[in-house]
Image (spheres, rainbow, N blue to C red):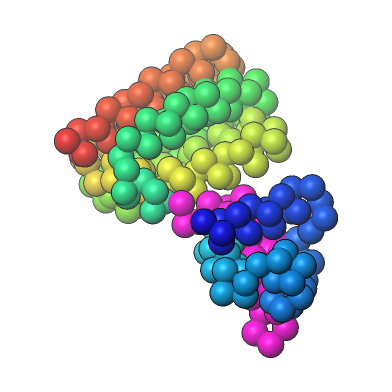
Amino acid sequence: TLSMRIARNILALIKEKHLRPGDRLPSERELAAAMRVSRPSLREALRALQIMNIIENRQGSGNYIASLEPKKLVEHLDAVFTLDDSTYHDLFQARKILETGVAELAAANATASELEELEKMVEEAKGRVDEPEAFLRLDLELHNRILAAARNPILELFMSSVNQLSLYSRRRTAESFAVRQRTLRDHRAIVKALRSRDPAAARAEMFKHLSHVEKGLEKTSG
């Protein structure tokens, strides 16, 4: 559609650095004239970009390029997964590629205090296995602590987006008592591998964990 083409043109300007976070867009009249499109079509494109958190409208001031933080850009994409469970396969494939590498780096880079905190979190989760929300919070925190221990800011950037996308699936699997029990055992094995400073074992245990969670999600969907 015309509005989609307009949105793509604006995204291209951002990608090519002609528009940067914080920049104010020309008025609708000026922008429509410059792009040679109707104002209704332009408004439709701008609304779509606002939903995607790429553009923000400031009342009385106009439209601006948003901060473009990865966390905000994927904020609404969990709707994709609520409509199409087959997309979860791609999500877990991405997690297996990224998080196994994270675990491998963490085995080499985690400090003694970080390892102690991870062990404490596993023990706390053991006492919260009957509480889905509390267990989910600890699950997310443990993975984030392992990510921080990997000491790689680029991976942190990637995982920020992936974690936002995976939140919906994690909520679904956290509802299953069997998955929570399996996750507790997996987390204990991962932390043990990290404590042993064994990158290969940490990678393997993280892969097994994500495979178990993916199978648990299939069961909750089936």
What residue appears at the point 69 percent right and 36 percent down from the top-left corner? 154
Q: Position of residue 137 (x, y in %)?
A: 41, 50
**Total marks placed:** 0
**Magenta segment boundaries in residue numbering:** 53-77
Residue 64 lies within the magenta run:
yes
Above-or-below relation of 131 to 102: below
In the picture provided, is 16 more to the left or to the right than 129? right
**Residue 67 figure quarter:** bottom right
Above-or-below relation of 61 to 130: below
What residue appears at the point 20 percent right and 39 percent down from the top-left corner? 220
In the image shown, does 39 or 127 lie closer to the viewer? 39
In the picture provided, is 14 more to the left or to the right than 134? right
Q: Position of residue 148 (x, y in %)?
A: 63, 38
**Residue 18 figure quarter:** bottom right
**Residue 64 figure quarter:** bottom right
What residue appears at the point 48 percent right and 39 percent down from the top-left corner? 142
Q: Position of residue 181 (x, y in %)?
A: 26, 34
